[in-house]
Image (cartoon, grey):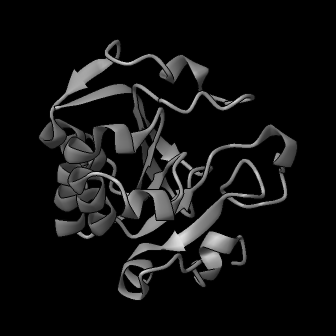
Amino acid sequence: MLDLSGIVGDSIVDGPGIRTTVFSQGCPHHCPGCHNPETWEFGCGTPMEEERILDIVRANPLCRGVTFSGGEPFAQAEGFAKLARLLKARGYEVASYTGYTFEQLLRGTPAQRELLEAIDILIDGPFLLEEKSLEVPFRGSCNQRILDVPQSLAAGRAVETAQKRWLGEY
């Protein structure tokens, strides 16, 4: 069961193509300038079963990707890992935003590692107001990276994606 602040279908700003974005409720980072400060408080969202979220995603035949946003999805890593596995089993690309870095998550909890292993793309790092940019696709600040998670896990270090669609090159 996940605690959500909302679900947005038909998103074109949280990754390439038409995606569904699942917003977690609760965030420990509290980044100055965050565009979702209403998601910071823990325990006040809408509880939703992972299977119900899958049904919502599957109801949109145009959606081929799902993005986890926040709040902080890695604060609910066990539930988001379950959801990611359900989505991947049905052919969806799964991406996640996080205020943690990949390196921090590698040293994180077993559930955080499980979520990493279940996703394709990670947009990592806190939002930094002093590095805010509208020029970096799918990110809020220049310090954030778009990582190919399977390649990063295999290499044991962060590997930025080479997928042109994630880099804004179509």
Q: Closest to the observer: 81 or 7?
A: 81
In the rendered structure, the answer to whether residue 74 lies left or right of residue 86 reads right
Q: Is residue 65 visible?
A: no
Give the vertical position of 116 relative to 157 (above or below).
above
State the residue in front, 9 or 46. Answer: 46
Is any atom of residue 5 visible in this view?
yes
Could you say where residue 73 lies in the image, as x and y percent from the top left? 39, 42
Residue drawn where x is 60% and y is 84% of the image:
162
Question: Which residue is situated farthest in the top direction here?
Answer: 44
Give the percent coordinates (x, y) of residue 42: 37, 19
Name the image quarter holding the N terminus: top left
Residue 48, compared with residue 20, is above or below; it is above
Q: Nearer the viewer, residue 164 or 125?
A: 125
Depth order, front residue of 55/28: 28
Does residue 131 lie above or below 94 as drawn?
above
For the point 55% across and 33% down, the residue is: 29
Describe residue 124's horizontal placement relative to residue 121 as left or right: right
Q: Position of residue 64 (x, y in %)?
A: 38, 63
Q: Quadrant of the C terminus?
A: bottom right
Q: Residue at x 26, y 40 (%)?
A: 56
Question: How many marks are shown on the rendered structure?
Answer: 0
The residue depicted at 37 percent of the width and 45 percent of the height is: 74
